[in-house]
Image (spheres, rainbow, N blue to C red):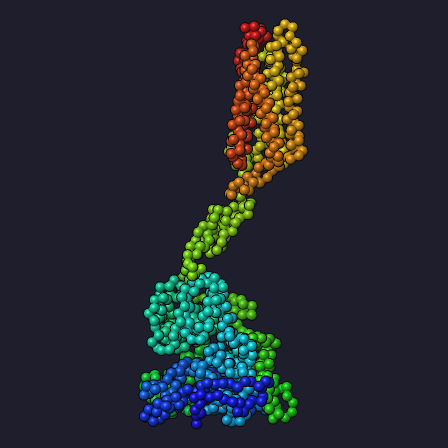
Amino acid sequence: MTAILPYVYSPLVQPNTNLGSEPPALEVKQILRRLPISKSQNPPPACDLHLVRTIEDYEYFQDGDVIIGGVFTVNYFMNGLNRYKIIHTYICLRPVPKNYKDLLTFRFAIEEINQDQTILPNISLGYHIYDSCSDSKKAVKSVLQILSGPRMTVPNYSCSGQRNVAGFIGDQGSATTVSMTQILAIYRYSQISYGATNYVLNDRNLYPTFYRTVLSARITYLMIAMMINFFKWTWVGIISSDDNSGNEETPILAEYLTMNGICVAYTIKVKLVSLDVLNNNEYRIISKSSAQVIILCGTYTPLLADWLREVRDVLRDKTLVLGPAFALNTFIMEHHREAFHGSLALEPSPLLIPDMRSFYESFQTISHPEDKLLAHIFLLNFGCLSGDSQMNENHQAVYNIPLHNCTGTERVTDFLSFQCKGFSDRVYKAVYLLARALHDLHMTSNGQSSRKINHLHRHSHQLHHFLRSQRSKDGNPYFLENGDFIGQFSIVNWINFKNGNILFKYVGHTKTEHHTFSVKIRKIIWKTSNNQVPASQCSENCSPGTRKVSKSRIHSCCYDCVPCSPGEISNVTDSDTCMKCSDLDWPNEKKDSCVPKQLEFLSYTDDTLVLVISLVSSVFSFLTFMILITFILYQDTAIVKANNRNLSFLLLVSILLSFLCVFLFLGHPVDLTCMLRQVSFGILFSVAVSCLLAKTIMVCIAFKATKPGSSWKLWIGSKWSNSLVMFCSSIQVIICVGWLSLAPPFPEMDTWSYQEKIIVQCNEGSVMAFYSVLGYMGVLASVSFITAFLARTLPDSFNEAKYITFSMLVFCSVWIAMIPAYLSTRGKYMVAVEIFAILSSSAGLLGCIFFPKCFIILWRPELNSRTQLLAGRSR
């Protein structure tokens, strides 16, 4: 008899007094909308249409002192049979042998525990199992039937008296599991899911008694995103089932992909409502996209497998990354070999369970005629007639396959999918964890066995506390505080060989507690012709030396590459920004590394300009020295004695040293050279110009002294000329000493004038002191020029004032031209300008003053006599 409850508001008919706190009444608006089909061939009255619907049930029951409820997904969906344009009944469709294996594992574990005297001694475990058919309403109905008894779906009511249900195992899908948990959490029944990954179930406020033997979707897709990032795939597609699992898992996956810098090219949600599921637009999206990597997530169903078969042509060159729901359904490789070849699957690491093959092989229709689910599996796969004529009629109408009698000796293990990996190890572990938790609760009571059983019934709402404290032999906990299972994933490479063999190769594993993983890339077989890691990018990689510039407001993975700005580098591929080099470094030509900037100074080793300057300075120094030697050898001749030979010697020495001080400006600046270079040439030129000024004044005095009775005769002599030189030079010396004392020059590195090089230069310390030295030298030169210019017409056989005038004209012209050139240049060329001024002005003094005298001394000696000198003066 089936209860008819179209709309029920159930009171607490028989309250469960075993709960720790009395739960509120569960309001069920419509427990069962689909009731048994009428066998009458006439349609029922319209007013009774809502009372003639039923749901096909697959039920397994074994009595025991304590009952463990089980809700399993064996059939993948439900559909309604339409008769007289009215849905009379809903039947479960597409049973999968691999999922039936999970149900058998549950039963095997119960039998094994009952035979083990170390767990729950003298207490028998029973079970009450239903197939949820992957339907949330069916799962809720199954839970209520387990709690209330067969054929009853009334909350808090049991038609068989005290229900001794201790806990629940199931379900596989997240949608059905959440629906179950919403009811079981109210009554504090412990529940262990063997396949649900929805992260919502981690909320301990809503679901305090929920646990699972698989990892949540968040951990799963975090590891997938990290793996995608590891292979540098930044442009991927997502294909998911269009159901609760797919709709909930896809945003989680997209979130973690985005966190790892990976863009989603497209998301395709496959509707699992009919076999005609192919959408030409979806086919076109996959074929035209440049994404070479596709992630499959959500729920795997046979209908999704059908969809994959329809699009297999465009998947042949794609690399598929499979979540656990697909990784455990390895039989799809048989039907989609080319599409799944080279795929990577994230598979839960297998748990150690006993060999149950002999137990599985015992399930044949001839030995288990009461097993309608087993008959349904053989009906779908082999077309075997079952003993239930209504089932034969209903399912033949749906599957449209010819039915015939089978031997009944066919074994469920003959199916290919039955041999594939699934959740059987998770089911086995869930049953044992629940049984051990019951054992620990059982051991907390004292007294007779009957009292212990009553103790289990009264305190079953506390079972989850003992479940949470379960530990392995190594002492490690099985569950986290939020009910998540502590486990790992294996990374499996799916390989299809040309000879038809299929290999599932383990190429890595994860450490979920540390969010790390390791992969042996060399072991992976890819689809690419050279077996290299496939590329899946929206844009080509930006090489070092460039940076990314986004060309899409939606996808950050679509970008252009632009060179780094001057002074910046990028030393990694696909850099978002460029880094500035330090002040002492500069980018190389490729702009992928910083190299030390070139040091710029007048170097002896690799600068031609230095060689030219050194050669010119050496030649003039040698020439000056030879002139000095000549004047020393001919110091008693008239032309040498005529213009104060002592001043001539001092002038030649100062010019010689001026040529040599050029070498202070060459080479790497150091403290000593920086302090001496400006001071030395300033003092030497001051001495030289002072000598010329003294010579000019002495010419004027000598002319005045020739007149009879002139008082200028007292000023004739070297005493006054030497004093004048000393006085004029000492002022420059005082300026230089003050400069060196207060703000001496020092070497520095100019990193700001040029980006690509560093100028090694001398900082003058005090600009005012530097220009004071030049200014004073200019004053001396101006006074000497004016004096010589006025004295140029004085009669004399060899009037040196003319030559001094020319020399001062050259001197002043050089230094006046040097100032703008000096201020407009930087680095070594600024120093070269100053060196040029020193050399040219010194050469001007040497040439204008001494070359004419040397010409007479060496080539016109007849003119170098006192007679010729007096004759010239008389004229």
Q: Residue at x 61, y 32 (%)?
A: 768
Q: Is residue 465 left or right of residue 521?
A: right
Q: Residue at x 62, y 26 (%)?
A: 683
Q: Nearer the viewer, residue 14 or 605?
A: 14
Q: Looking at the picture, how far across and down is residue 516, in whole percent?
A: 53, 66
Q: Quadrant of residue 267?
A: bottom left
Say if 642 sits above or below 529 in the image.
Answer: above
Q: Looking at the picture, how far across and down is residue 802, in whole percent?
A: 54, 15
Q: Is residue 242 visible?
A: yes
Q: Looking at the picture, how far across and down is residue 448, in whole percent?
A: 63, 93
Q: Is residue 37 visible?
A: no
Q: Residue at x 49, y 75 (%)?
A: 197
Q: Nearer the viewer, residue 198 or 295?
A: 198
Q: Quadrant of residue 851?
A: top right
Q: Quadrant of the N terminus?
A: bottom left
Q: Quadrant of the C terminus?
A: top right
Give the total number of marks visible in the rendering: 0
Q: Is residue 849 left or right of residue 573?
A: right
Say if 267 sits above or below 584 in the image.
Answer: below
Q: Looking at the picture, how far across and down is residue 713, in whole percent?
A: 65, 10
Q: Quadrant of residue 235?
A: bottom left
Q: Nearer the viewer, residue 764 or 535?
A: 764
